[in-house]
Image: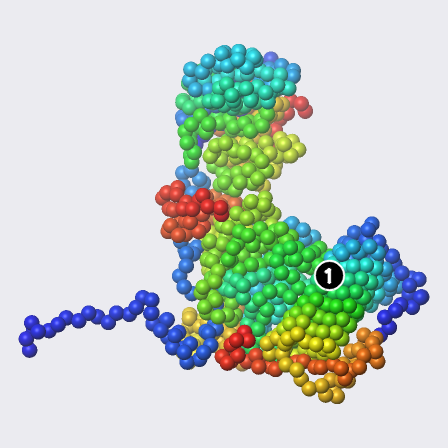
Amino acid sequence: MCGIVGLFLKDPKLEPELGAMLAQMLDVMCDRGPDSAGFAVYGAGAPGFVKLTLRGPAGTDFAKIGAEIGHLVTPRDTHAVLSVPAAEEMAARTALARIAPDIRVVGAGARMELYKEVGLPADVARRFKLDAMSGTHAIGHTRMATESAVTTDGAHPFSTGPDQCLVHNGSLSNHAGVRRRLAREGVSVDTENDSEVAAAYLTYRMRSGDSLGEALTHSLDDLDGFYTFVVGTESGFGVLRDPIACKPAVMAETDGYVAFGSEYRALAGLPGIDSARVFEPEPAKVYFWDRAA
Amino acid sequence: MKLSLTPAAAERAVDIDLASSALRELNAALHKLTPDTNETYWRIANPAGRHAIAAGLDVPVTVEIDGPVGYYCAGMNKQASVIVNGNAGVGVAENMMSGFVHVKGDASQSAGATAHGGLLVIDGNASARCGISMKGVDIVVKGSVGHMSAFMAQAGTLTVLGDAGEALGDSLYEAKLFVRGSVAGLGADCVEKEMRDEHRTLLAAKLDAAGILGEVDISEFRRYGSARSLYHFHIDNVSSY
Amino acid sequence: MNDMTHTPRTKPRVSATFDEYTLSEIRRAAATGIYDIRGAGAKRKVPHFDDLLFLGASMSRYPLEGYRERCDTSVVLGTRFAKKPIELKIPVTIAGMSFGSLSANAKEALGRGASTMGTSTTTGDGGMTNEERGHSKTLVYQYLPSRYGMNPDDLKRADAIEVVVGQGAKPGGGGMLLGQKITERVAAMRTLPVGIDQRSACRHPDWTGPDDLEIKIEELREITDWEKPIYVKVGAARPYYDTALAVKSGADVVVVDGMQGGTAATQEVFIENVGIPTIAAVHQAVKALQDLGMHRKVQLVVSGGIRNGADVAKALALGADAVAIGTAALVALGDNDPHYQAEYEALGTVAGAYDDWHEGRDPAGITTQDPELMKRLDPVAAGRRLANYLAVLTLECQTIARACGKSHVHNLEPEDLVALTIEAAAMANVPLAGTDWIPGRDGRF
């Protein structure tokens, strides 16, 4: 029902190629998810600044909005990245809500930029010029909608916390109950999408003090159904499959990168793939890589 | 039974101040006592109306509480003697099995409720439902008891030196009630019964146990018991149900 | 005879209001002057679990393979305050039924069957017997208004304590045990004269209301050194408030018993006209727990009319942690078995309809204290039947949970259910099948 890709670079020399590598991976996953696509890229950040990824209706004049708010804005099609000093984030969000109420903040963080749109994934990647982006790690998703609507809001990745995002392939069977539980803990989930519940769950765990790895371990107890998750944080990249592991996953690791794909096809074009260690992640085993470690 | 402690016992007292110790610690310590313990006298300061003080004891020790207690003091007591130098809240000595509970002040509602055995002495008054559903306990109230006392009382004795409130002994089973003063009203199926020698002997034994034999005139008491007309359902008694 | 002169007559018409049953009850009342007393639960048709259906997995959800892929059924009760919570292997427990209303053999059989399957049994109004303690690995001790046989030793040897505020067959009513069943042993346990018609109080003797219950629960915890889970059982009437108040009173577990729940002996008019159906109660109780942020923290046990694994699964999907069975367990033991048809007929009834449990003449030897009748129930064989039945309930529940893609039966959700009727949809707060319409969704509950 969906295709997932992910790339975590170990070799800094590859960083300028990150977007191009991911775009190529996403492109071959069009078949698995023709409805919409999205990706998150962890690129450069400015110390003391937060990047807000904005999404607006087609034709939004982001430059004008940036000027009104008084912060640097970098438009990309229906999205734009607003760079604001961390101390002014709330003020900027408030001003944004006042000046441009139809603009949504789809992601926030020191390094993460998040883009998603309805349409064929290859087209979505082109619209946002993914192939020109650089960074340390990125995840992407192509979606075939199941029980929620084909909308941009329903597209992955889902971000519910700073620099945190998740893509999901599968179908959670207890997301309604988890959603209610999160709501009581003050974590709101905007869409009807089960994957956003998973993202919010991880955010909730990490907010409560879990590391990414610990949060993923807890999700084995609390999230039921079928899932393969690929998640990103400011410095890390994680993968988890449910204990039954019906949804496909394949990974490749070289000295230069760790790559994830729903199918090997997505990895086939990566440099040095022929000599990479290619493996399927084990069921119910938490994998994560962290740049800080 | 002697109600005052010997000086020797007082010297061996374990002192617990509930202003600085948690109730849980006190009860846990009392529950850990074994029958052969040397810590046979406990003195509790500053109860401040806390609930469930000395509840669930099962050793022959004495616990003396200096001040007013809340609900269920000495609840489900077995063997122990619990003395309250003050008033007791709802349900003092509820479901007591054996032992002795002495309230030197007044007791609130449901004193000695459902208690199966032992002796409960209340120096002051007991309010409503004293001895409700009692199942074998002996209760002696030196003052008066409130309404609905001995409601559905099944066994044991309730002795009241003062007066009884409305609906005494409503739906009574086999408990025996002795009241020296006035009775504001009898409950359904409760009737005054003849005071025969066997009853005078029984009453004397209860007064003796409470340490007041000879202080009151047994001939001033009247006896109340079950008419047993509700023991088998009959339509003619329907207004009593 | 001339055909043309024949006047057609309408057929005799029986009133829908004054039907045959009603007429017979009026005649019985007129002859005896006593209301009808009987056992069992509500017999009238009310919206029930039958009116709900599961949405199995298809394209958008994936099912689990039966037998191979894990679908857990364990349930832990009493995680809130108790030092020693109870762990049950299956989400089905045996509801409180007293020795006195049931024979010693029946109580033993319940213990044997439940223990075989790793679940609990519950005492009833009348105290704990050594037999049931001995045969029940996990035993819940009921704390009732009458306090018959209540004592601290049994309190301490129980695995959990259930403070009974009410039961579904008679929310607001006290117990009854008629003279035929007050044998010497029963009388001694209850401190009552032999052979009398026992009436039990409808309120506890030393507390009234949730503010006092909080203090009572504290006392029970102090007496048992905070080890044992404390349940509060209510008959379904206002389950939203009752559940919330039980939580506020400090309960570890709330037990909600719907109007289909059985009783040993109560007025028919009470059984049929007081309380609300089980499916209406579950949703309100769960809502109360959710509103307090205590769902799954204070466990919910639901009872009243549970018969099969689908009922179990539906109760769990609506948010219960476990269910309790009473009537169904008695049937598994052998209650109302057609084998005794001739004897049921001699009692003026038929196998399947016998509910004069209070009379103590049960041909199956279950709801009796008659030593000869009691002998008919072999506690070992009857215990085996109960274990088998519990196993089937569990397997059926797992089958449905797997079909809905759940690796634990507790992951069933209201969103897995739809209703066949508007009434059931409104009561259970799930959509009418084929729609996304939940009647009354905007109500407070």
Q: Residue at x 86, y 60 (%)?
A: B43
Horizontal side, residue C369 vs residue B58: left or right:
left
Q: Residue C60 in the image: state x and y as whole percent.
A: 42, 37
Q: Secondary structure at mark 1?
A: loop
**Residue at point 80%, 78% (across, down):** B207
Q: Chain of mark 1?
A: B
Question: Residue C39 appears at what percent x and percent y?
Answer: 49, 70
Tell me if B94 is positioned left or right of B21 in this view.
left
Here the colouring is rainbow
- Decide if residue C36 is in sight here: yes
| Label total for image | 1
Q: Identify the residue at image location x=50%, y=50%.
A: C284
The amino acid at mark 1 is: Gly
Closest to the observer, B33 or B111? B111
Toward the bottom, the furthest residue is B197
Inspect this view and state whether residue C365 appears: no
- Which residue lies under the disc numbered 1? B89
Rendered residue at 66%/70% (across/down): B147
Q: Nearer the viewer, residue C305 or A3?
A: C305
